[in-house]
Amino acid sequence: MQKEELKERISGLLNNENYKPLNITELVMIFSDTKKGGVMISEVIREMEEDGDLFINKKGKIGSLAYYGMAKGKFMAKTKGFGFISLGDQDVYIGADDTNHAFNDDTVIVKITKDATGDKKAEGVIIRIVERANDEFVGRLEVSKNFGFVVPDRNKMSTDIFVAKRDFNGAKENDMVVCKITKWPDSDKGAKGVIVDVIGQRGERYVEIDSIIRSHKLPDAFPKKVEIELKNIPDSISKSEMEGRLDLRDRLTYTIDGSDSKDFDDAIDIVKEGNIYKLSVHIADVTHYVRENSNLDKEALKRATSVYMVDKVVPMLPEKLSNGLCSLNPGVDRLTLSCLMDVDSKTGKVVNYNIEKTIINSKARMTYTQVSDILENEDRDLIDRYSDFVESFKNSRDLADILRKKREKRGAIDFDFPEAKIKLDSQGMPVDIAPYERRVSNKMIEEFMLLANETVAEHYFWLKVPFVYRVHEEPDEDKIVTLKNFIAGLNYKMPMSKGGLKSKDMQKLLGSIDHKEEKRAIGSVMLRSLRQARYSPECLGHFGLAAKYYSHFTSPIRRYPDLQIHRIIKEDIEGRLSDKRKAHYASILEDVSSQSSTQERKAEMAEREVDDYYKSVYMSTKIGEVFEGAISGVTSFGIFVELDNGVEGLIRLRELPDMYIYNDMSHTLVGERTGNVFRLGQVVQVELINVNVEAREIDFDLV
């Protein structure tokens, strides 16, 4: 019997509801009657214990973690030392004294000490660290006479790291450094380490950004073996590469992107014939250059996504591909995968479609601003300059309106919370933070990409071939209860469809609310009640989009799942998707989905951290100024207020002239003496009183 099979059998026994804990000798007798087999079983049990897949108590009795009221999960550390462990169906709160020196992302075993009740999370203590996520941390060096301490980001490590002077590696006071742990902290002593790299002086802009990149372990430069492979890729397309492709180079195809975009992975063309819009969405054929299991492919999967950090990008693919051969630049031939759709102008339904290997030649590189100015403002100069395209732009606008109404009718949610765009000067310093405007052309491209993603996903679902889907599952039941209670507290009632809460119920409620503050508050709590979207080889639907079938097909330059399904699609088109290849994909797609989801979260956290840095720097010049904002969070220690430009700061309770009682169910603070109430969505006037750029903290006071 192989080890993996034996592990499955042991797990099956331990998780049987009738199982009572046994010792190793008793388990050996169940699974083997030979000495050699007994030795193997003992080894497997010890391995499973080490991996956190079972628990052995002080009496030597072996049981599942669940039997002993335990679970295995990843620890998510917070600044104040406490944290949470996500167990899929619930988060477990871990107090600062109960972390057992676990750090952010460590895999741990938690003992549940208090079950979840109502709005309150379950509580627990960490009894063992199964695996450390990191042994290197980014932090600031504080120097004493013969030693120093590296002070890491408190969200990742809650203790300073002792470093002997001989291990400074040239670092000096206030340098941001990478420190490798040589001794983990325990109940007697703190952590020890050595400095392995010096990033630069704290406070310098590029040092701050590079520190964030290093702390999230985002790869920057590409390995030499990738660069070598790149040199073997021709700079132009040969005639042989065009063979077997539908030639669409004579079409009026164009791209629409932001003015600062450099990688164009999607282009469109559209004409109207009678009651049918013939919409073609063309996507860069990245897999023509990134071959499976090549060094390029392995590095792309490792990164899984491009990370956009205001004025710096950590790309998934090297620039030769992302901004060159794969980018649908104007006036050059490009290899593409195209979703060619006939859409009924009355219903918005796709009545016919083809997914093809194609070659295109984009006729224009348009920006969102240009196209929106043509359609919204009838800009005469732009209309004259792009006269050949104006009819196509109008067709795009009209079709996008039809598609949007169709999505809204089926229940898709659009919270429409404003995003902020940070503008830097020539020195890289933030000079403005303004809401990002979603104009008509942004919405056009959004609708067309959604339609292509859905069409491709449904096609391959019914073909029953292994695929990667973008899934967004229904909210947890406890989150729904919390949401309903909050809404009831504002004298609203959540509509409920047969079979449970649907996205159209949320949409219906939001549409019925006229009060701006209440609408903002309910929308905020709704958003928090939703699960995070992720990638999966299972087609589980997309709750937020109210879509049964959804995938990411349209951005293979910057997302690995798109690249992965392009590979499957091309093999299908070419007739090479044999049973052997299907089995191959079935064996790898779970790992591809997991890696892509994990890297997406890392990218989001890094992008958010960079934004927070620039927001702090920007606001540091405005101390004493008064702003209007809306309450975005209410906690037992203060009130978070978000300004129109997306900057968020905290009003600490100690700054308020009253004692306030926190109600976590209604997300309110009520003054004991004055009766003042602060609630989510409420508009307030605040004065900026302090900014800590290093900690990314912004403090407001109520005006």
Image (cartoon, rainbow, N blue to C red):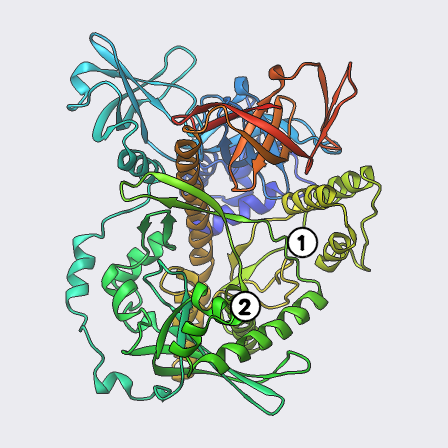
Residue at (47% x, 27% y) in the render? 697
Of residue 695 and residue 87, the one placed in the foreground of this image is 695
User: Which quadrant of the rendered structure holds the C terminus?
Assistant: top right
| Picture layout, residue 231 above or below residue 279 | above
- Which is nearer the eye, 102 or 96? 96
- Give the foreground label among 2 and 1: 2
> Label 2: few (<14), some or many (≥20) within 10 Å?
few
Image quadrant of residue 538? bottom right
Image spot of residue 45 (x, y percent): 47, 37
Q: Quadrant of residue 70?
A: top right
Tell me: 150 left or right of 487. left
Distance between mark 2 and mark 1 Cα atoms: 37 Å
Amino acid under label 1?
Glu
Furthest-front residue in view? 380
Rendering coords of residue 650 (x, y %): 56, 27
Q: Secondary structure at mark 1?
A: loop
Q: Is residue 68 visible?
A: no
Q: Is residue 601 above or below residue 409?
A: above
N-terminal label among 2 and 1? 2
Position above or below: 132 against 252: above
Residue bearing mark 2: 376
Task: List the single residue furthest toward the bottom.
Answer: 274
Residue closest to the eye, 116 or 692: 692
Residue highlighted by disc 1: 474
Residue 691, image x, y percentages: 45, 25
Element type where label 2 sits in the image: helix
Please give the name of the residue rendered at 70% of the width and 63% of the height, measured from the top-left corner: 411
